[in-house]
Image (cartoon, coloured by chain):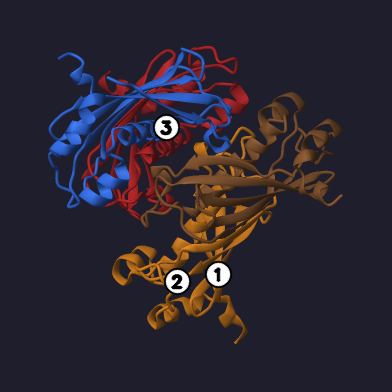
Chain colours: A blue, B red, C orange, D brown
């Protein structure tokens, strides 16, 4: 099971009056993380949408904020595919400052698979096969 | 116990390729809701920060997405103060399209009270008294 | 010629470390202004796109920042249709704090009219007729 | 005179219904570019603000949009210090898709130097010396 690491830097418009990253930016960072995981799995989002009409809207989101991220900090977003079910997937995320083990935030998103018509859809076999090496549920087998 | 209703309209940059509001906007709408609740309680955030050095950083956030909000939709954000503890508060939110009861999303945020030095701090009595009429926990008394 | 006034409040994530609205938010406020003008003209953007396949991408943007807008300020965005040409339109904007004449910022956007295929397109007559009462160039007749 | 190149990828929440990057994101990309230039000059913004109380608010912004940037595109932001005056600076920017010379957008920002009290301030000599190697006006000497 691989955790995919993506890096980003805290941008000026992302920090608030307290000079720390605003909490609404974390879901954007999480999305950067899973975008990278999907790309590494050979299943980039853009292709899934454009070629297969397959979308993964977020149905649930949770974040715990442990410590503030500050302006210009270099961050590491660690993303794991925590669950790969028939018609939904679950990603876990943790965010640290580069070179420091201290957790700044951790969270999860759950995504339903839907077709272009907006209806729930089973995840196609070809996609499952690409995602399985990244799936935490594989670990226990 | 009052639920405070705030209205907003889905802005163009808030929608994505699917023409629906991006999930990272919901925490911003939640924040608009609790800002309004605090203002109605006579305790606007700006004053708390500037005059009392009291901050309420988000320590936890959760959202369930039920149905998409679309470009230019008029939304109602209903905010309740679900918990008013010694050193933290919890808000609940629900978002509907104006004039329709169908829930688009619901969620919560938990906030710790901290002083200007970043240390946890008890919520001052004067502030508690302003918030209590809005607190759901009062309802059961 | 009417200037259309839209109001908004400076949101927490829109302010930066200096506690003033970040400059990248002004184009979003301008967009709120012209969206409202188009709606009042009976030609809401959403309809133009969905029903007529007509888009107005921004081809040029300019802003002069005069004085900072601060957290929770109530703003007025004044929008005028400064030019209504064959295949492009130009809007002018000015932003003030509600109840104060002092200019916080002023700016403009130029938009080309394009069809669903991305090609330039003349503005349809029916739309021109709706926009003309809002057009500054009418004023001189 | 060096043009500093910064790279970024178009994020999902940055694209709109037309599946192209929203125009309000370009000022954010420009800011990433000049942040990198300042860092390379040995004068990172954070330090200037925190240690010298020196701020560079944007007083003017202009952008010309040539061609759309699309979801997940890798972009290069080229930033040059076009003018280094006594109390203001001017940056120029151009944005291309990585590996392609076609210009997607170009623009500029003008920044006044102000002290912590919000008053205009001359740019300190030590900072000028760091910025001069990056300044286009040096080129002609």
Image quarter (top left, top right, bottom left or bottom right) of the N terminus of chain B: top left
Nearest the viewer among B46 and C114 is: C114
D87 on left or right of B115: right
Q: Which structural element holds mark 2? A: loop
Relative height, residue C30 to residue A5 (above, below): below
Distance CA(mark 2)–CA(mark 3): 34 Å
Identify the residue position indicated by label 2 in the image.
C113
Which residue bears the numbered disc 1?
C90
Q: Residue at x 50, y 12 (%)?
A: B120
Neighbor class of circle 3 (other Cα within 10 Å; few <14, some 14-19, many 20+) is many
C-alpha distance separating marks 2 and 1: 11 Å
Q: Look at the picture and state if B54 lies above or below B66.
A: above
User: Would you say the residues marked 2 and 1 are in contact, meaning their CB atoms lie under 8 Å apart?
Assistant: no
Q: Which mark is residue A29?
A: 3
Q: Position of residue A59 (x, y in %)?
A: 24, 36
- Front residue of B25/D126: it is D126
Q: Is residue C137 left or right of residue C118?
A: right
- On the same chain, marks 2 and 3? The answer is no
Residue B7 at x, y = what percent?
38, 47
Q: CA distance from mark 3 to mark 1?
A: 35 Å
Q: Percent position (x, y) of residue C136?
A: 58, 76
Looking at the rendered image, the quarter that the C terminus of chain B falls into is: top left
> Mark 2 falls within which chain?
C
The dot on residue A118 is none
On the same chain, marks 3 and 1? The answer is no
Decide if residue D64 is in sight here: yes
Q: Secondary structure at mark 1?
A: strand
């Amino acid at each position: 099971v691989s955790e995919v690491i993506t890096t980003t830097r805290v941008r000026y418009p992302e920090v608030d009056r307290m000079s720390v990253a605003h909490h609404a930016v974390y879901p954007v960072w999480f999305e950067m993380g899973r975008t990278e995981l999907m790309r590494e799995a050979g299943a980039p989002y853009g292709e899934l949408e454009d070629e297969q009409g397959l979308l993964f809207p977020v149905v649930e989101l949770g974040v715990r904020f442990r410590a503030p991220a500050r302006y210009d900090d270099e961050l590491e977003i660690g993303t794991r595919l925590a669950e790969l079910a028939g018609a939904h997937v679950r990603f876990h995320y943790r965010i640290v400052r580069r070179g420091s083990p201290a957790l700044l935030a951790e969270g999860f998103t759950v995504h339903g698979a839907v077709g272009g018509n907006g209806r729930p859809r089973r995840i196609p076999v070809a996609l499952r096969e690409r995602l399985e090496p990244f799936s935490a549920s594989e670990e226990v087998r």
